[in-house]
Image: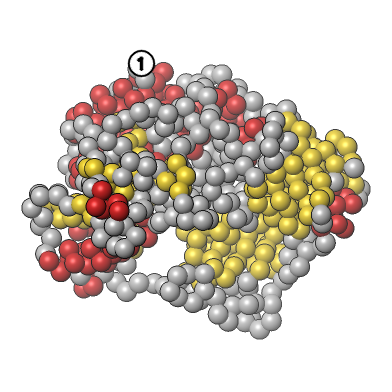
Protein backbone atom coordinates (compact mmCIF):
# COMPACT_ATOMS: atom_id res chain seq x y z
CA UNK A 1 0.00 0.00 0.00
CA UNK A 2 1.11 3.57 -0.55
CA UNK A 3 1.94 5.70 2.50
CA UNK A 4 0.04 8.91 3.13
CA UNK A 5 2.23 11.99 2.90
CA UNK A 6 1.79 14.21 5.98
CA UNK A 7 0.32 17.67 5.71
CA UNK A 8 3.65 19.02 6.89
CA UNK A 9 5.35 17.40 3.89
CA UNK A 10 2.86 18.90 1.44
CA UNK A 11 2.66 22.36 3.01
CA UNK A 12 6.42 22.74 3.19
CA UNK A 13 7.08 21.55 -0.35
CA UNK A 14 7.55 25.05 -1.73
CA UNK A 15 10.28 25.79 0.81
CA UNK A 16 11.87 22.32 0.69
CA UNK A 17 10.96 20.77 -2.68
CA UNK A 18 13.71 18.14 -2.63
CA UNK A 19 13.43 16.47 0.76
CA UNK A 20 10.96 13.66 0.32
CA UNK A 21 11.95 10.01 0.13
CA UNK A 22 10.78 6.74 1.62
CA UNK A 23 12.97 3.85 2.61
CA UNK A 24 12.45 0.34 3.90
CA UNK A 25 13.66 -1.23 7.13
CA UNK A 26 15.04 -4.28 5.30
CA UNK A 27 18.77 -4.59 5.88
CA UNK A 28 20.65 -3.68 2.71
CA UNK A 29 23.81 -5.36 1.48
CA UNK A 30 25.20 -2.33 -0.30
CA UNK A 31 28.23 -0.61 1.15
CA UNK A 32 27.85 2.97 2.29
CA UNK A 33 29.72 4.36 -0.71
CA UNK A 34 27.40 2.62 -3.21
CA UNK A 35 24.32 3.76 -1.32
CA UNK A 36 25.64 7.30 -1.31
CA UNK A 37 26.20 7.19 -5.08
CA UNK A 38 22.70 5.85 -5.71
CA UNK A 39 21.11 8.40 -3.37
CA UNK A 40 22.87 11.16 -5.29
CA UNK A 41 21.76 9.68 -8.62
CA UNK A 42 18.08 9.77 -7.67
CA UNK A 43 18.20 12.98 -5.63
CA UNK A 44 16.47 15.10 -8.31
CA UNK A 45 13.27 13.12 -7.72
CA UNK A 46 13.54 13.30 -3.91
CA UNK A 47 10.74 15.85 -3.48
CA UNK A 48 7.25 16.23 -2.10
CA UNK A 49 5.62 18.26 -4.86
CA UNK A 50 6.06 16.04 -7.92
CA UNK A 51 5.77 12.42 -9.05
CA UNK A 52 8.88 10.27 -8.94
CA UNK A 53 9.87 6.65 -9.12
CA UNK A 54 10.52 3.36 -7.40
CA UNK A 55 13.90 1.69 -7.79
CA UNK A 56 15.20 -1.74 -6.80
CA UNK A 57 18.76 -3.02 -7.14
CA UNK A 58 19.95 -6.49 -6.17
CA UNK A 59 23.22 -8.37 -6.53
CA UNK A 60 23.48 -12.15 -6.34
CA UNK A 61 19.79 -12.15 -5.43
CA UNK A 62 20.26 -9.90 -2.39
CA UNK A 63 18.50 -6.50 -2.47
CA UNK A 64 21.00 -3.69 -1.97
CA UNK A 65 18.77 -0.70 -2.72
CA UNK A 66 14.96 -0.47 -2.44
CA UNK A 67 13.45 2.97 -2.38
CA UNK A 68 10.61 5.16 -3.51
CA UNK A 69 11.03 8.80 -4.43
CA UNK A 70 8.48 11.54 -4.93
CA UNK A 71 4.72 11.23 -4.99
CA UNK A 72 2.68 8.24 -6.04
CA UNK A 73 -0.23 10.66 -6.46
CA UNK A 74 -0.14 14.44 -6.58
CA UNK A 75 -3.92 14.38 -6.28
CA UNK A 76 -3.98 12.49 -2.97
CA UNK A 77 -0.56 13.42 -1.58
CA UNK A 78 0.67 9.83 -1.25
CA UNK A 79 4.30 8.85 -1.44
CA UNK A 80 6.05 6.29 -3.61
CA UNK A 81 7.38 3.44 -1.47
CA UNK A 82 9.06 0.11 -2.23
CA UNK A 83 5.57 -1.42 -2.05
CA UNK A 84 3.96 0.91 -4.62
CA UNK A 85 2.51 -0.82 -7.66
CA UNK A 86 3.17 0.61 -11.12
CA UNK A 87 2.65 -0.33 -14.72
CA UNK A 88 5.73 -1.84 -16.36
CA UNK A 89 4.51 -1.06 -19.90
CA UNK A 90 6.28 -2.88 -22.72
CA UNK A 91 8.46 -4.72 -20.21
CA UNK A 92 5.40 -7.00 -20.23
CA UNK A 93 6.40 -8.29 -23.65
CA UNK A 94 8.84 -10.96 -22.57
CA UNK A 95 6.25 -12.38 -20.16
CA UNK A 96 3.94 -12.73 -23.17
CA UNK A 97 6.71 -14.33 -25.24
CA UNK A 98 7.39 -16.87 -22.50
CA UNK A 99 3.65 -17.64 -22.30
CA UNK A 100 3.74 -18.54 -26.01
CA UNK A 101 6.79 -20.75 -25.48
CA UNK A 102 5.09 -22.55 -22.58
CA UNK A 103 2.27 -23.51 -24.93
CA UNK A 104 4.89 -24.72 -27.39
CA UNK A 105 6.35 -26.88 -24.61
CA UNK A 106 2.86 -28.29 -24.09
CA UNK A 107 2.74 -29.24 -27.78
CA UNK A 108 -0.20 -26.89 -28.30
CA UNK A 109 1.38 -24.61 -30.90
CA UNK A 110 4.35 -24.14 -33.22
CA UNK A 111 6.14 -20.79 -32.89
CA UNK A 112 7.25 -21.07 -36.53
CA UNK A 113 3.68 -21.39 -37.85
CA UNK A 114 1.94 -18.41 -39.49
CA UNK A 115 -0.29 -16.39 -37.20
CA UNK A 116 -3.40 -17.27 -39.23
CA UNK A 117 -2.92 -20.89 -38.15
CA UNK A 118 -4.29 -19.83 -34.76
CA UNK A 119 -6.22 -16.70 -35.74
CA UNK A 120 -7.78 -17.91 -39.02
CA UNK A 121 -9.84 -14.74 -39.46
CA UNK A 122 -6.59 -12.96 -40.40
CA UNK A 123 -6.76 -13.84 -44.09
CA UNK A 124 -4.72 -10.86 -45.30
CA UNK A 125 -1.09 -9.79 -44.73
CA UNK A 126 -1.59 -9.61 -40.94
CA UNK A 127 -1.83 -13.41 -40.89
CA UNK A 128 1.45 -13.99 -42.76
CA UNK A 129 4.09 -13.58 -40.01
CA UNK A 130 4.97 -16.48 -37.77
CA UNK A 131 4.58 -16.25 -34.00
CA UNK A 132 8.37 -15.96 -33.76
CA UNK A 133 8.34 -13.02 -36.17
CA UNK A 134 5.87 -11.23 -33.91
CA UNK A 135 7.93 -11.95 -30.80
CA UNK A 136 11.07 -10.32 -32.25
CA UNK A 137 9.25 -7.50 -34.11
CA UNK A 138 10.15 -8.72 -37.58
CA UNK A 139 6.58 -9.52 -38.68
CA UNK A 140 6.14 -6.36 -40.75
CA UNK A 141 2.42 -6.13 -39.98
CA UNK A 142 0.55 -2.86 -39.58
CA UNK A 143 -0.21 -1.55 -36.09
CA UNK A 144 -3.79 -0.26 -36.05
CA UNK A 145 -3.00 1.94 -33.05
CA UNK A 146 -0.28 3.83 -34.92
CA UNK A 147 -0.85 5.91 -38.10
CA UNK A 148 -3.78 3.75 -39.33
CA UNK A 149 -5.69 4.33 -36.11
CA UNK A 150 -4.92 8.04 -36.14
CA UNK A 151 -6.41 8.30 -39.64
CA UNK A 152 -9.41 6.20 -38.67
CA UNK A 153 -10.24 8.14 -35.50
CA UNK A 154 -9.27 11.59 -36.74
CA UNK A 155 -6.51 11.68 -34.14
CA UNK A 156 -5.61 9.63 -31.08
CA UNK A 157 -8.74 7.85 -29.80
CA UNK A 158 -10.03 8.55 -26.29
CA UNK A 159 -10.49 4.84 -25.54
CA UNK A 160 -10.00 1.79 -27.77
CA UNK A 161 -12.71 -0.82 -27.30
CA UNK A 162 -11.85 -4.42 -26.54
CA UNK A 163 -11.55 -6.44 -29.75
CA UNK A 164 -10.64 -3.46 -31.94
CA UNK A 165 -7.08 -4.64 -32.58
CA UNK A 166 -8.19 -7.95 -34.07
CA UNK A 167 -11.06 -6.40 -36.01
CA UNK A 168 -8.88 -3.72 -37.60
CA UNK A 169 -6.06 -6.16 -38.35
CA UNK A 170 -8.47 -8.12 -40.55
CA UNK A 171 -8.93 -5.07 -42.78
CA UNK A 172 -5.31 -4.49 -43.74
CA UNK A 173 -4.39 -5.31 -47.32
CA UNK A 174 -0.81 -4.03 -47.02
CA UNK A 175 2.13 -4.48 -44.67
CA UNK A 176 5.13 -2.47 -43.55
CA UNK A 177 7.49 -5.00 -45.14
CA UNK A 178 7.81 -8.75 -45.76
CA UNK A 179 8.01 -10.94 -42.63
CA UNK A 180 11.59 -11.45 -41.47
CA UNK A 181 13.00 -8.61 -43.54
CA UNK A 182 13.87 -6.17 -40.77
CA UNK A 183 13.03 -5.05 -37.25
CA UNK A 184 10.43 -2.37 -36.55
CA UNK A 185 8.85 -2.28 -33.09
CA UNK A 186 5.19 -3.35 -33.19
CA UNK A 187 2.76 -3.45 -30.27
CA UNK A 188 0.01 -5.08 -32.31
CA UNK A 189 2.07 -8.23 -32.74
CA UNK A 190 2.10 -8.80 -28.98
CA UNK A 191 -1.58 -8.01 -28.71
CA UNK A 192 -2.31 -10.72 -31.29
CA UNK A 193 0.06 -13.15 -29.52
CA UNK A 194 -1.99 -12.60 -26.36
CA UNK A 195 -5.13 -13.69 -28.23
CA UNK A 196 -3.33 -16.83 -29.39
CA UNK A 197 -2.44 -17.64 -25.77
CA UNK A 198 -6.07 -17.13 -24.73
CA UNK A 199 -7.48 -19.36 -27.46
CA UNK A 200 -5.01 -22.19 -27.12
CA UNK A 201 -4.50 -21.88 -23.37
CA UNK A 202 -8.24 -22.10 -22.76
CA UNK A 203 -8.44 -19.16 -20.37
CA UNK A 204 -8.11 -15.36 -20.30
CA UNK A 205 -4.58 -14.10 -20.84
CA UNK A 206 -4.46 -12.67 -17.30
CA UNK A 207 -5.34 -16.06 -15.81
CA UNK A 208 -2.72 -17.83 -17.93
CA UNK A 209 -0.02 -15.45 -16.74
CA UNK A 210 -1.07 -15.89 -13.13
CA UNK A 211 -1.30 -19.67 -13.19
CA UNK A 212 1.68 -20.53 -15.37
CA UNK A 213 4.20 -17.72 -14.67
CA UNK A 214 3.42 -15.51 -11.68
CA UNK A 215 2.12 -17.88 -8.99
CA UNK A 216 4.95 -20.43 -9.41
CA UNK A 217 7.46 -17.64 -8.75
CA UNK A 218 5.59 -16.09 -5.83
CA UNK A 219 4.93 -12.85 -7.72
CA UNK A 220 1.73 -12.11 -5.82
CA UNK A 221 1.76 -8.35 -6.44
CA UNK A 222 2.03 -8.69 -10.23
CA UNK A 223 -0.96 -8.94 -12.54
CA UNK A 224 -2.40 -7.99 -15.90
CA UNK A 225 -4.47 -4.80 -15.85
CA UNK A 226 -6.09 -4.45 -19.30
CA UNK A 227 -7.61 -1.02 -18.62
CA UNK A 228 -6.60 2.04 -16.63
CA UNK A 229 -10.29 2.57 -15.95
CA UNK A 230 -10.11 -0.37 -13.51
CA UNK A 231 -9.47 0.55 -9.88
CA UNK A 232 -6.47 -1.22 -8.32
CA UNK A 233 -5.49 -0.64 -4.68
CA UNK A 234 -1.91 0.45 -4.10
CA UNK A 235 -1.15 1.54 -7.67
CA UNK A 236 0.48 4.90 -8.37
CA UNK A 237 -1.17 7.52 -10.52
CA UNK A 238 0.54 8.31 -13.81
CA UNK A 239 1.49 11.87 -14.61
CA UNK A 240 2.01 13.86 -17.81
CA UNK A 241 4.04 17.05 -17.39
CA UNK A 242 2.48 20.09 -19.08
CA UNK A 243 4.19 23.15 -20.52
CA UNK A 244 3.17 25.28 -17.52
CA UNK A 245 4.71 22.84 -15.01
CA UNK A 246 1.42 21.25 -13.98
CA UNK A 247 0.51 17.59 -14.52
CA UNK A 248 -2.30 15.76 -16.26
CA UNK A 249 -3.44 12.28 -15.39
CA UNK A 250 -2.02 9.59 -17.69
CA UNK A 251 -4.57 7.04 -18.90
CA UNK A 252 -3.66 4.64 -21.68
CA UNK A 253 -6.49 4.75 -24.26
CA UNK A 254 -7.32 1.04 -24.38
CA UNK A 255 -9.75 -1.34 -22.74
CA UNK A 256 -7.66 -4.30 -23.88
CA UNK A 257 -3.99 -3.68 -23.03
CA UNK A 258 -2.63 -7.22 -22.98
CA UNK A 259 0.82 -8.67 -23.65
CA UNK A 260 2.07 -5.55 -25.39
CA UNK A 261 2.16 -3.57 -22.14
CA UNK A 262 -0.61 -4.44 -19.68
CA UNK A 263 1.21 -5.67 -16.57
CA UNK A 264 1.42 -4.06 -13.14
CA UNK A 265 4.13 -4.99 -10.65
CA UNK A 266 6.29 -3.91 -7.71
CA UNK A 267 10.04 -3.59 -7.41
CA UNK A 268 10.30 -6.70 -5.19
CA UNK A 269 8.35 -8.86 -7.63
CA UNK A 270 10.46 -7.58 -10.52
CA UNK A 271 13.71 -8.27 -8.65
CA UNK A 272 12.41 -11.78 -8.01
CA UNK A 273 11.67 -12.12 -11.73
CA UNK A 274 15.09 -10.83 -12.75
CA UNK A 275 16.84 -13.33 -10.48
CA UNK A 276 14.84 -16.07 -12.20
CA UNK A 277 15.54 -14.67 -15.66
CA UNK A 278 19.33 -14.93 -15.27
CA UNK A 279 19.42 -17.83 -12.80
CA UNK A 280 17.90 -21.25 -12.16
CA UNK A 281 14.54 -21.72 -13.84
CA UNK A 282 11.24 -22.76 -12.29
CA UNK A 283 9.18 -21.62 -15.27
CA UNK A 284 10.12 -22.54 -18.82
CA UNK A 285 12.47 -25.20 -20.12
CA UNK A 286 16.13 -24.66 -20.93
CA UNK A 287 15.21 -24.81 -24.63
CA UNK A 288 12.53 -22.14 -24.20
CA UNK A 289 14.92 -19.79 -22.44
CA UNK A 290 17.54 -20.41 -25.08
CA UNK A 291 14.98 -19.27 -27.66
CA UNK A 292 14.06 -16.27 -25.51
CA UNK A 293 17.66 -15.06 -25.68
CA UNK A 294 18.54 -16.07 -29.24
CA UNK A 295 19.33 -13.14 -31.50
CA UNK A 296 17.20 -13.08 -34.66
CA UNK A 297 18.61 -13.26 -38.16
CA UNK A 298 17.04 -10.94 -40.74
CA UNK A 299 16.55 -11.75 -44.41
CA UNK A 300 19.78 -9.79 -45.07
CA UNK A 301 21.69 -12.36 -43.00
CA UNK A 302 22.48 -9.81 -40.29
CA UNK A 303 21.82 -10.56 -36.64
CA UNK A 304 19.72 -8.33 -34.42
CA UNK A 305 19.80 -7.57 -30.69
CA UNK A 306 16.06 -7.84 -29.97
CA UNK A 307 15.32 -11.47 -29.11
CA UNK A 308 11.91 -12.65 -27.85
CA UNK A 309 10.78 -9.73 -25.74
CA UNK A 310 14.30 -9.10 -24.47
CA UNK A 311 17.25 -7.12 -25.83
CA UNK A 312 20.85 -8.32 -25.51
CA UNK A 313 23.68 -5.87 -26.02
CA UNK A 314 27.01 -4.72 -24.63
CA UNK A 315 27.56 -1.88 -22.19
CA UNK A 316 31.09 -1.00 -21.12
CA UNK A 317 32.36 -4.48 -21.90
CA UNK A 318 29.63 -6.49 -20.14
CA UNK A 319 26.48 -8.01 -21.59
CA UNK A 320 23.19 -6.54 -20.44
CA UNK A 321 19.74 -8.09 -20.96
CA UNK A 322 16.88 -5.65 -20.69
CA UNK A 323 13.55 -4.27 -21.80
CA UNK A 324 12.09 -0.81 -21.31
CA UNK A 325 8.45 0.17 -21.22
CA UNK A 326 6.18 3.19 -21.35
CA UNK A 327 2.51 3.97 -21.09
CA UNK A 328 1.00 7.44 -20.79
CA UNK A 329 2.55 8.85 -17.63
CA UNK A 330 4.76 5.91 -16.65
CA UNK A 331 8.17 4.68 -17.88
CA UNK A 332 10.19 1.59 -16.95
CA UNK A 333 13.52 -0.11 -17.40
CA UNK A 334 14.22 -3.69 -16.34
CA UNK A 335 17.86 -4.75 -16.71
CA UNK A 336 20.22 -7.47 -15.59
CA UNK A 337 24.00 -7.84 -15.91
CA UNK A 338 24.29 -11.65 -15.79
CA UNK A 339 28.08 -11.72 -15.44
CA UNK A 340 27.85 -9.77 -12.18
CA UNK A 341 24.40 -11.02 -11.10
CA UNK A 342 23.30 -7.38 -10.95
CA UNK A 343 19.55 -6.79 -11.31
CA UNK A 344 17.91 -3.38 -11.71
CA UNK A 345 14.30 -2.23 -11.94
CA UNK A 346 13.38 1.45 -12.24
CA UNK A 347 9.79 2.65 -12.74
CA UNK A 348 8.81 6.32 -12.97
CA UNK A 349 5.20 7.45 -12.63
CA UNK A 350 5.96 10.33 -15.00
CA UNK A 351 7.07 10.47 -18.65
CA UNK A 352 9.66 13.23 -18.60
CA UNK A 353 12.44 10.99 -17.24
CA UNK A 354 14.64 8.32 -18.81
CA UNK A 355 14.82 5.09 -16.79
CA UNK A 356 17.00 3.37 -19.41
CA UNK A 357 19.73 5.98 -19.02
CA UNK A 358 19.35 5.84 -15.23
CA UNK A 359 19.79 2.05 -15.21
CA UNK A 360 23.13 2.41 -16.99
CA UNK A 361 24.20 4.94 -14.37
CA UNK A 362 23.26 2.41 -11.68
CA UNK A 363 25.64 -0.07 -13.33
CA UNK A 364 28.36 2.59 -13.21
CA UNK A 365 27.68 3.24 -9.52
CA UNK A 366 27.53 -0.40 -8.38
CA UNK A 367 30.29 -1.99 -10.44
CA UNK A 368 33.80 -0.72 -9.98
CA UNK A 369 35.53 0.86 -12.96
CA UNK A 370 37.91 -2.09 -12.94
CA UNK A 371 34.97 -4.32 -13.93
CA UNK A 372 33.94 -2.09 -16.81
CA UNK A 373 35.62 -0.79 -19.93
CA UNK A 374 35.61 2.97 -20.62
CA UNK A 375 32.41 4.49 -21.94
CA UNK A 376 32.27 4.90 -25.72
CA UNK A 377 30.83 8.40 -26.05
CA UNK A 378 28.47 9.42 -28.83
CA UNK A 379 29.89 11.53 -31.64
CA UNK A 380 30.02 15.27 -31.16
CA UNK A 381 28.09 17.27 -33.74
CA UNK A 382 30.84 19.87 -33.86
CA UNK A 383 32.70 19.81 -37.17
CA UNK A 384 30.18 17.38 -38.72
CA UNK A 385 28.34 19.82 -40.98
CA UNK A 386 29.30 17.76 -44.03
CA UNK A 387 26.98 14.90 -43.07
CA UNK A 388 24.33 16.70 -41.01
CA UNK A 389 21.14 16.89 -43.02
CA UNK A 390 18.20 14.88 -44.34
CA UNK A 391 18.75 11.83 -46.52
CA UNK A 392 16.06 10.23 -48.69
CA UNK A 393 15.63 7.14 -50.85
CA UNK A 394 12.98 7.58 -53.58
CA UNK A 395 13.04 3.80 -54.10
CA UNK A 396 11.90 2.79 -50.62
CA UNK A 397 10.60 6.25 -49.63
CA UNK A 398 12.68 6.04 -46.47
CA UNK A 399 13.87 9.21 -44.77
CA UNK A 400 16.85 9.35 -42.42
CA UNK A 401 18.28 12.42 -40.77
CA UNK A 402 21.68 13.04 -39.23
CA UNK A 403 20.97 15.82 -36.76
CA UNK A 404 22.70 17.87 -34.10
CA UNK A 405 20.91 16.78 -30.92
CA UNK A 406 21.13 18.66 -27.61
CA UNK A 407 22.44 16.65 -24.65
CA UNK A 408 22.08 18.09 -21.16
CA UNK A 409 25.40 19.25 -19.76
CA UNK A 410 27.32 18.38 -22.95
CA UNK A 411 27.95 19.74 -26.40
CA UNK A 412 25.35 18.70 -29.02
CA UNK A 413 25.78 15.14 -30.30
CA UNK A 414 25.02 13.49 -33.61
CA UNK A 415 21.73 11.61 -33.61
CA UNK A 416 19.80 9.65 -36.21
CA UNK A 417 16.19 10.40 -37.04
CA UNK A 418 13.93 7.91 -38.81
CA UNK A 419 11.05 9.43 -40.76
CA UNK A 420 11.47 12.71 -38.89
CA UNK A 421 11.61 11.09 -35.41
CA UNK A 422 14.88 11.09 -33.46
CA UNK A 423 15.71 7.46 -32.60
CA UNK A 424 19.08 7.57 -30.86
CA UNK A 425 22.59 8.97 -30.66
CA UNK A 426 25.23 7.88 -33.16
CA UNK A 427 28.46 6.25 -31.98
CA UNK A 428 31.63 5.40 -33.90
CA UNK A 429 31.72 1.85 -35.29
CA UNK A 430 34.05 0.24 -37.86
CA UNK A 431 35.01 3.55 -39.42
CA UNK A 432 31.41 4.69 -39.71
CA UNK A 433 28.56 5.55 -37.35
CA UNK A 434 26.00 3.31 -35.65
CA UNK A 435 22.68 3.96 -33.97
CA UNK A 436 21.08 1.09 -32.09
CA UNK A 437 17.87 1.12 -30.08
CA UNK A 438 15.34 -1.58 -29.14
CA UNK A 439 12.65 0.67 -30.63
CA UNK A 440 14.06 0.26 -34.14
CA UNK A 441 17.10 -2.01 -34.22
CA UNK A 442 20.39 -0.79 -35.65
CA UNK A 443 21.17 1.61 -38.48
CA UNK A 444 24.76 2.04 -39.68
CA UNK A 445 26.07 4.98 -41.68
CA UNK A 446 28.98 4.45 -44.05
CA UNK A 447 31.06 7.62 -44.08
CA UNK A 448 32.60 8.80 -47.36
CA UNK A 449 36.30 8.12 -47.81
CA UNK A 450 36.96 11.71 -48.85
CA UNK A 451 36.39 14.03 -45.92
CA UNK A 452 36.34 17.18 -48.04
CA UNK A 453 33.09 18.84 -49.07
CA UNK A 454 29.51 17.72 -48.54
CA UNK A 455 28.63 14.33 -50.04
CA UNK A 456 25.45 14.17 -52.09
CA UNK A 457 24.88 10.51 -51.23
CA UNK A 458 25.35 8.37 -48.13
CA UNK A 459 24.95 4.62 -47.66
CA UNK A 460 22.82 3.44 -44.75
CA UNK A 461 22.46 -0.15 -43.55
CA UNK A 462 19.18 -0.93 -41.77
CA UNK A 463 18.79 -4.45 -40.31
CA UNK A 464 21.64 -5.45 -42.61
CA UNK A 465 20.00 -4.05 -45.76
CA UNK A 466 22.27 -1.60 -47.61
CA UNK A 467 20.66 1.32 -49.39
CA UNK A 468 21.97 4.55 -50.91
CA UNK A 469 20.30 7.80 -49.85
CA UNK A 470 20.40 11.22 -51.50
CA UNK A 471 20.82 14.46 -49.61
CA UNK A 472 17.74 16.66 -49.52
CA UNK A 473 18.13 20.42 -49.91
CA UNK A 474 18.73 22.43 -46.74
CA UNK A 475 15.56 24.42 -47.47
CA UNK A 476 12.49 22.93 -49.12
CA UNK A 477 10.00 24.65 -51.38
CA UNK A 478 7.58 27.20 -49.98
CA UNK A 479 4.37 25.63 -48.71
CA UNK A 480 2.30 27.82 -51.00
CA UNK A 481 4.19 26.53 -54.05
CA UNK A 482 3.80 22.86 -53.09
CA UNK A 483 0.15 23.48 -52.24
CA UNK A 484 -0.64 24.10 -55.90
CA UNK A 485 0.12 20.40 -56.49
CA UNK A 486 -1.07 18.54 -53.41
CA UNK A 487 -4.05 20.40 -51.95
CA UNK A 488 -7.16 18.21 -52.29
CA UNK A 489 -8.89 15.14 -50.83
CA UNK A 490 -7.34 11.69 -50.34
CA UNK A 491 -8.77 8.29 -49.48
CA UNK A 492 -7.30 5.63 -47.14
CA UNK A 493 -8.97 2.53 -48.56
CA UNK A 494 -7.98 -0.05 -45.91
CA UNK A 495 -10.03 1.69 -43.24
CA UNK A 496 -12.27 3.68 -45.64
CA UNK A 497 -11.31 7.13 -44.40
CA UNK A 498 -11.12 10.41 -46.30
CA UNK A 499 -8.67 13.16 -45.38
CA UNK A 500 -7.61 16.36 -47.10
CA UNK A 501 -4.57 18.53 -47.63
CA UNK A 502 -5.21 22.23 -47.22
CA UNK A 503 -3.27 25.48 -47.02
CA UNK A 504 -4.01 27.87 -44.16
CA UNK A 505 -2.09 31.09 -43.51
CA UNK A 506 0.83 29.82 -45.55
CA UNK A 507 1.03 26.45 -43.72
CA UNK A 508 0.19 23.05 -45.24
CA UNK A 509 -1.90 20.61 -43.21
CA UNK A 510 -3.20 17.11 -43.75
CA UNK A 511 -6.58 17.44 -42.04
CA UNK A 512 -7.75 14.23 -40.32
CA UNK A 513 -11.39 15.42 -40.15
CA UNK A 514 -12.27 14.46 -36.58
CA UNK A 515 -15.96 14.43 -35.69
CA UNK A 516 -15.35 17.48 -33.52
CA UNK A 517 -12.46 19.74 -32.62
CA UNK A 518 -9.29 19.92 -34.68
CA UNK A 519 -6.70 17.26 -35.45
CA UNK A 520 -4.22 17.39 -38.30
CA UNK A 521 -0.70 16.75 -39.47
CA UNK A 522 1.26 19.95 -39.97
CA UNK A 523 3.50 19.50 -43.02
CA UNK A 524 7.02 20.87 -43.47
CA UNK A 525 8.22 20.61 -47.09
CA UNK A 526 11.75 19.19 -47.30
CA UNK A 527 11.76 18.90 -51.10
CA UNK A 528 9.29 18.59 -53.96
CA UNK A 529 9.03 14.86 -53.11
CA UNK A 530 8.94 14.63 -49.31
CA UNK A 531 7.64 16.51 -46.26
CA UNK A 532 7.99 15.97 -42.55
CA UNK A 533 4.98 16.29 -40.29
CA UNK A 534 3.97 16.68 -36.67
CA UNK A 535 0.64 15.92 -35.04
CA UNK A 536 -1.27 18.90 -33.69
CA UNK A 537 -4.42 19.33 -31.66
CA UNK A 538 -5.21 15.84 -30.40
CA UNK A 539 -2.59 14.47 -28.01
CA UNK A 540 -2.13 15.25 -24.29
CA UNK A 541 1.67 15.47 -24.54
CA UNK A 542 3.73 17.36 -27.13
CA UNK A 543 4.62 15.49 -30.33
CA UNK A 544 7.33 17.70 -31.88
CA UNK A 545 7.97 15.43 -34.87
CA UNK A 546 5.99 12.44 -35.98
CA UNK A 547 6.59 11.20 -39.52
CA UNK A 548 7.15 11.86 -43.21
CA UNK A 549 5.01 12.14 -46.31
CA UNK A 550 6.16 11.20 -49.82
CA UNK A 551 4.37 12.49 -52.90
CA UNK A 552 3.51 10.05 -55.70
CA UNK A 553 3.28 11.37 -59.25
CA UNK A 554 2.41 9.89 -62.64
CA UNK A 555 3.11 11.93 -65.75
CA UNK A 556 3.62 15.00 -63.59
CA UNK A 557 0.28 14.66 -61.79
CA UNK A 558 0.00 13.89 -58.05
CA UNK A 559 -1.77 10.55 -57.64
CA UNK A 560 -1.41 10.01 -53.93
CA UNK A 561 0.63 10.27 -50.74
CA UNK A 562 2.69 7.74 -48.79
CA UNK A 563 2.73 8.23 -45.00
CA UNK A 564 5.51 6.77 -42.85
CA UNK A 565 6.88 7.08 -39.34
CA UNK A 566 9.07 5.01 -37.03
CA UNK A 567 6.48 2.19 -36.79
CA UNK A 568 4.44 2.50 -39.99
CA UNK A 569 5.84 2.40 -43.52
CA UNK A 570 4.28 3.53 -46.79
CA UNK A 571 0.64 3.88 -45.86
CA UNK A 572 -1.10 4.73 -49.14
CA UNK A 573 -3.56 7.62 -49.51
CA UNK A 574 -5.08 7.76 -52.98
CA UNK A 575 -5.96 11.14 -54.41
CA UNK A 576 -9.66 11.70 -54.97
CA UNK A 577 -9.99 15.36 -55.98
CA UNK A 578 -7.75 18.38 -56.39
CA UNK A 579 -8.50 21.76 -54.90
- Location of residue 510 (image quadrant): top right
Q: Position of residue 531 (x, y in %)?
A: 73, 55
Q: Residue, x 52% and y 24% (percent of image)?
A: 161
Q: Residue, x 21% and y 28% (percent of image)?
A: 215
Lateral position of residue 415 relative to residue 90, left or right = right
Task: Indicate how the structure is coloured in the image.
Answer: secondary structure
Q: Could one spot residue 480 in this view of the protein? A: yes
Lateral position of residue 566 relative to residue 235, left or right = right
Q: Residues within 10 Å of mark 1 (few under 14, many from 20)?
A: few
Lateral position of residue 389 relative to residue 183, left or right = right
Q: Could one spot residue 570 in this view of the protein? A: no
Q: Position of residue 32 (x, y in %)?
A: 12, 66
Q: Secondary structure at mark 1?
A: loop
User: Where does label 1 land, which residue?
Assistant: 202
Is 496 above or below relative to 468? above
Find the residue positioned furthest to the bottom.
Answer: 452
Find the residue positioned furthest to the left.
Answer: 27
Q: Quadrant of the N terminus?
A: top left
Q: Quadrant of the C terminus?
A: top right
Q: Residue, x 64% and y 48% (percent of image)?
A: 535
Q: Position of residue 283 (x, y in %)?
A: 23, 33
Of 224 and 24, nearer the camera is: 24
Find the residue positioned furthest to the top.
Answer: 202
Q: Position of residue 181 (x, y in %)?
A: 56, 45
Is 496 above or below relative to 49? above
Of 94 and 71, nearer the camera is: 71
Of 200 and 151, nearer the camera is: 151
- Location of residue 97 (image quadrant): top left
Amino acid sequence: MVRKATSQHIQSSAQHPRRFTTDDTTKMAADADTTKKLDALFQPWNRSDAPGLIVGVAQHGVPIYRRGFGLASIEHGTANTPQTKMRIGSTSKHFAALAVLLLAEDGTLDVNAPLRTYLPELTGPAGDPTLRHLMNHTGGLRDPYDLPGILLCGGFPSMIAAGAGLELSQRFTSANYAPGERMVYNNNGYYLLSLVVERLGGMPFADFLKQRLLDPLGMGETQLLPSDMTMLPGIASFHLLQADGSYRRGIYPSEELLGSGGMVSTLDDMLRWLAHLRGDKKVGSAESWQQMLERPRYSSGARGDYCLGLTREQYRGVEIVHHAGAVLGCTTQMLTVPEHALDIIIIFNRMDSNPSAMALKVIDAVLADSALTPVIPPVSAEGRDAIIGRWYSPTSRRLFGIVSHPVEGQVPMLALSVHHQVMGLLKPCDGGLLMTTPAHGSVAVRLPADGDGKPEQLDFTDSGHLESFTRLPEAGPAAVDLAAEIVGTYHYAELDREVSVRLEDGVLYLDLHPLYGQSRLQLEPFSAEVCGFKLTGSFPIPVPTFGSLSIAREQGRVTGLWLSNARTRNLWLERRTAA
